Image: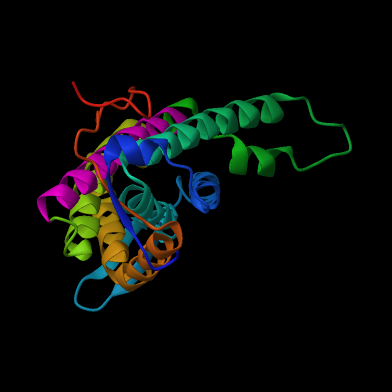
Amino acid sequence: MAGRQDIVGGVEGARRQFRYFDYVMAAFVTILLLSNVIGAGKVAVVDLPLLGAWPFGAGVLFFPVSYVLGDVLTEVYGYAHARRCIWAGFVALLFMAFMAFVVVALPPAENWGNQAAYEAVFGQVPRIVFASIVAFWAGEFVNAYVLARMKIWTRGKALWSRTIGSTVVGQGVDSALFYPLAFLGAAGWTPDLVITVALTQWALKTGWEALLTPVTYAVVGFLKRREGVEVFDEGTDFSPFAHGTRARG
């Protein structure tokens, strides 16, 4: 029944089969890949009242949607299912980086004059790829862990507090890792600019999460009703490397 919800622990939740999980995971990975391809390396600027010019990483506009979906995954399906999605995204990022490297490295045909433009879009330097993958992996696992723990502490109440709270911590880790690893010491990237962009990215992503809270509530409510389950990660092994159904020892 769509209106009935079974309250289950993390281990039992990890063993369940869900109707919409695969769709949410596909959306999560898709947005993750597109955000990394399109906006990660560009610094944009907007003029804000009282603050003036405000630089930010362009990928911040859409990448937070993957964090919203990450929150939805942990809140609805539990940490173990979120862990599967994070690893799926991690592998997808690795394959995207490998594919981009191979395709860019192929010698272009003599009458094809778009190699330079192609390299500008897809020829990400290794350190940016490395930074992106490391920051994603660490930030997402921290985000999922904090949300799952807060759900237990709040007994499932005040969803907004754990979606925003987990994003504050998870995005803090993501931003603190990505921009220094990717750009510190690179041409045009002064230490002050790296810090400014990292802090701005963290603030904007957290702000996006807060603004999207009504959407998160709607999606979480719909999925919980349709899946008929409420997962609390009590007894869950929170190691990123644990198997999905393994309980904490």
Magenta stretch: includes residue 134: yes
Q: Residue at x 42, y 52 (%)?
A: 66
Quadrant into which the C terminus falls: top left
3 or 163: which is nearer to us? 3
Can the viewer see residue 75? yes
Magenta stretch: includes residue 244: no
Q: Where is residue 178 in the image (x, y as percent from the top left)?
A: 33, 37
Q: Position of residue 129 (x, y in %)?
A: 46, 31
42 or 238: which is nearer to us? 238
The answer to which quarter of the image holds residue 140 is top left
104 or 151: which is nearer to us? 151
Above or below residue 177? Residue 212 is: below
Q: Which residue is drawn at 36% across and 67% down?
A: 221
Q: How is the image coloured?
A: rainbow
The answer to which quarter of the image holds residue 60 is bottom left
Q: Which residue is drawn at 64% across and 29% down?
A: 99
Can the viewer see residue 179? no
Q: Main secondary structure of the magenta part?
A: helix
Provide the residue span drawn in magenta. 129-154
**Residue furthest toward the right?**
111
Quadrant into which the N terminus falls: bottom left
Q: Position of residue 158 (x, y in %)?
A: 17, 65
The answer to which quarter of the image holds residue 55 is bottom left
Q: How many labels does the image show?
A: 0
Q: Where is residue 145 in the image (x, y as percent from the top left)?
A: 23, 40
